[in-house]
Image (cartoon, rainbow, N blue to C red):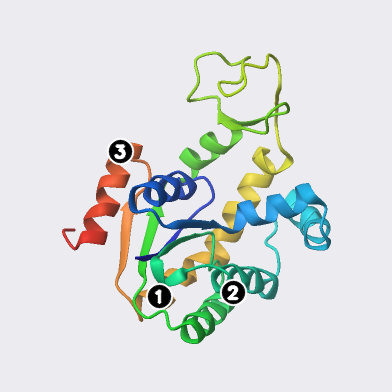
């Protein structure tokens, strides 16, 4: 089972990908996580990507394509995967087509999660990083706003630069301009399921499973 999940930043792709990864025992490939890990390790890629990520811009298509291809080629991709965060531009679609052809990936599931802009802004501006354990939480989802639910550290939450409202709105504008054309591109080649990302987590998961089992 090979799944491509896309949608605006903060729509819930990562949450659903983790759920589906555990349920179907397939690898979750998040380009965002790959980049953040590179930044944390201060690799050449991480150093180059940090400035771009902090400003809310997208890293280059060639860079993302190389990351995705390398990751897929070094795993048992035939057993299944969930790709989250790629492709985001028409150029990345071309790169993805080349990767699919080279790796003989023929019929992936394309799933778009959609949500209202203001809902996404509210979600992302309430995200915080625990400076002690590096867990990301959402203030909308926890009862104690001063205590990390993972490590119980007090007053450890910090706001990441890419979760500031001005950066988020810039990312959403870039998404509308660069990523929405991806939907048109893939709708001409594959069946793309468009689902409401503002439903409950359980409802979104259920709707995705209906698509995967052909019961949508």
Residue that appears at 32% across and 40% down: 199
Q: Which mark is residue 186?
A: 1
Residue that appears at 77% across and 58% down: 49
Location of mark 3 (residue): 202
Q: Nearer the viewer, mark 2 or mark 3?
A: 2
Mark 1 closeness class: few <14, some 14–19, many ≥20 residues within 10 Å = some
Left or right, 130 with reference to 196? right
On the image, the x and y values in percent for residue 138 come to 54, 29
> Can I make out residue 183 in this image?
yes
Dot 2 or dot 3: first in sequence order is 2
Q: Which mark is residue 201?
A: none
Location of mark 2 (residue): 69
Give the secondary structure at mark 1.
Answer: helix
Using the rendered view, name the quadrant where residue 156 is placed: top right
Dot 1 or dot 3: first in sequence order is 1
Callout 2–callout 3 Cβ contact below 8 Å: no
On the image, the x and y values in percent for residue 120 come to 50, 42
């Amino acid at each position: 089972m090979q799944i491509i999940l896309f949608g605006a930043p903060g729509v819930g792709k990562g949450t659903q990908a983790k759920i589906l990864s555990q349920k179907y025992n397939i690898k979750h490939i998040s380009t965002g996580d790959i980049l953040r890990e590179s930044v944390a390790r201060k690799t050449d890629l991480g150093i180059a990507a940090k400035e771009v990520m902090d400003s809310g811009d997208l890293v280059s298509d060639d860079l993302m394509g190389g990351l995705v291809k390398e990751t897929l080629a070094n795993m048992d991709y035939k057993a299944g995967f969930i790709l989250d965060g790629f492709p985001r531009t028409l150029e990345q679609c071309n790169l993805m087509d080349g990767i699919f052809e080279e790796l003989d990936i023929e019929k992936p599931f394309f799933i778009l999660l959609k949500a209202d802009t203001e809902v996404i802004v509210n979600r992302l501006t309430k995200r915080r990083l625990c400076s002690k354990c590096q867990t990301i939480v959402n203030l909308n989802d926890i009862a104690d706003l001063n205590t990390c639910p993972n490590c119980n550290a007090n007053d450890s939450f910090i706001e990441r630069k890419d979760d500031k409202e001005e950066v988020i709105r810039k990312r959403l504008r870039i998404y509308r301009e660069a990523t929405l054309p991806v939907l048109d591109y893939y709708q001409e080649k594959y069946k793309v399921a468009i689902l409401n990302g503002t439903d409950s987590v359980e409802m979104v998961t259920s709707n995705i499973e209906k698509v995967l089992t052909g019961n949508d």
